[in-house]
Image: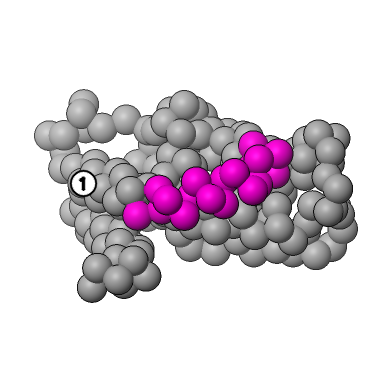
Amino acid sequence: MLGLPLLSYVSLMSITPGPNNLMLAASGVNFGFRRSVPHLLGISIGHGVQVLLVSLLLGWVMAWLDDWRLLLTLAGCSYLLWLSWQVWLAGEPQAKQLVRPMGFIGAAAFQWVNPKAWVMVINTALLFLPLQAQLSHALLLALACALINFPCICVWAGLGEALRRHLSQAAARRWFNGIMALLMALTALYLLYDELQLAGVL
């Protein structure tokens, strides 16, 4: 169960661009790596808890997710659009007091409305749990996923920290935050459009 295929899959899904990583890059630029650590831990531990619960309740989660999928996507995309606005505000000097890094609880909770996280977690449970999975299997899988995920997402906060030196000018920081906010908003709108098409609304 905990071999190279799991390492490859979780690493690839964790390190590729998505809502979490875009937010972490922006957090690294605006607040630095150290102040982004609660955000990082919230994502990885939240991911591990999500893997554990989905692994234990896979059948129920699949049926529940089918019923609530559109609502979860709407909630996740709405929250992502709000976060995009917060990243945009981070580029405005007068708004510095209003913006702070995402905390542990917020980052962990975001995994439950993050469409990419749901795809990753359900595929992980389906692909890497034995047919007669027990609590020990689910715990081991959840721990492995959290441990693999953490260094992968640290790359994004670290890249943000590295860019921070080159974005010390207010104008450059505003441009970066504007681009990141736009990418996050486009990601949210794409996910929403895709889900509405699947639901037959569009």
**Looking at the magenta stretch, what is its main secondary structure?**
helix
Quadrant hosting residue 44: top right
Q: Residue at x 86, y 48 (%)?
A: 132
Q: Which corner quadrant holds the C terminus?
A: bottom left
Quadrant hosting residue 41: top right
In the image, residue 44 sits, relative to residue 153, either above or below, namely above
The answer to whether residue 18 is left or right of residue 94 is: right
Which residues make up the magenta segment? 53-70
Q: Let me know if residue 68 is in the magenta part.
A: yes
The answer to whether residue 168 is left or right of residue 35 is: left
Q: Which residue is at the front of the view, 166 or 101?
A: 101
On the image, the x and y values in percent for residue 156 come to 51, 53
On the image, the x and y values in percent for residue 36 come to 47, 35
Element at label 1 = helix
Q: Which residue is mark 1?
A: 85
Q: Which residue is at the front of the view, 17 or 156?
A: 17
- Please count the marks in the image: 1
Dot 1 amino acid type: Trp
The answer to whether residue 76 is left or right of residue 110 is: left
